[in-house]
Amino acid sequence: MSNARNTIIIGSGPAGLTAAIYAARASLAPLVIEGEPSSTSDQPGGQLMLTTEVENFPGWPEGIQGPELMMKFKEQAARFGAEFITEKVTKVDFSQRPFTVWVREQEYKADSVIVATGAQSLMLDLPRESELIGHGVSTCATCDGFFFRGHEIAVVGGGDSAIEEATFLTKFASKVHLIVRRDALRASRIMQQRALENPKIEIVWNSQVTALHGDSSLSGVTLTKTDGSTQELPVTGLFIAIGHKPNTGVFTGVLEMEDSGYLMTRAGSTYTNVEGIFACGDVQDHTYRQAITAAGSGCMAAIDCERWLENQH
């Protein structure tokens, strides 16, 4: 092997930072390239930086703020010797070892790389949307549904995930408006049936959310119909379920990915199609998308990476 670093970890959400904790404790001295604070896709700390209260992460019975949780992840990794660069990876070369990762003009070389760049929820791109995230606007029913017990809320989307979210939210909400852009659902037949038969779900056809209302938290939304008419909906929660986009642009043509852009890993492991490159967290998981599952796969990636490096020696 070379004089390059043992491993570089790209990304610093729950997956990347858990990988950093495990890699650092294994004396691999990982370099974590954590992302850019100004970037919506690759920001340090991942999607939890946009979350307020986190109540479903084990070990925090009273809940914890998303940014605080990620800071504790980072402190733990740093304690064991992980090094951090708050920049965004701009280019990679995985064609030969040691692998090369660029941050603008600066080159970093490593014998292995763990990719944990995560995914981002597709948003509506409306004014005040980002400031109301965590204050009535959410992209995760499993994470935030509990806070809307007895509330009237809305879900945007017409696919399987939107109906899944809406159905889950009926456990808490008094009523769920499913806002669909067209006059038909894209979801599978069984999911459509589930939505149509649920007395708590009301489908609002041919409509788009065009404005958000409320000062410190969401108090309602404006819907615009395909015929141009508008409707005010007095909801306190809005769940956006129009899809996710994995942050894999820099790996296009380099690593094997699905048509949707998610990185492909070998079954039961975090190995990608390139020996020595591992992927974990939401960048390769489009099923669970939870902080705890991302952290678990970050642990897997670090262990896979450590064992692979041992075999190389």
Image (cartoon, grey):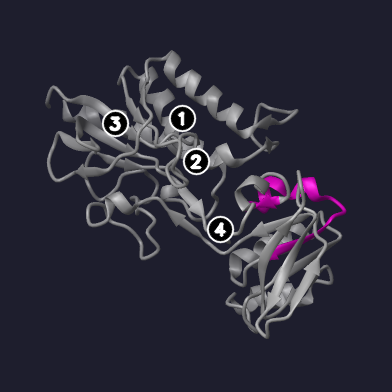
The residue at 80%/59% (across/down) is 235
Element class at badge 2 = helix
Reading the chain from its start, which is encountered first: label 2 or label 1? Answer: 1
Please indicate whether residue 43 sits to the left or right of residue 49 in the image.
left
Q: Which residue is mark 1?
A: 18
Hey, what amino acid is under mark 2?
A: Ala
Q: Which residue is mark 2?
A: 294
Query: Considering only vertical position in the picture, is 18 above or below 283?
Result: above
Query: Where in the figure is residue 297, as x and y percent of width and height?
Result: 45, 39
Q: CA distance from mark 4 to mark 2?
A: 21 Å
* Image quarter of residue 168: bottom right
Please name which of the two marks, 1 or 3, marks the residue nearer to the observer. 3
Hey, what amino acid is under mark 3?
A: Ile
- Reply yes or no: does residue 153 show up in magenta: yes
Q: Dots 2 and 1: beta carbons under 8 Å?
A: yes
Q: Which residue is mark 3?
A: 8
Q: Dots 4 and 1: beta carbons under 8 Å?
A: no
Query: Where in the figure is residue 23, as x and y percent of width and height?
Result: 36, 24
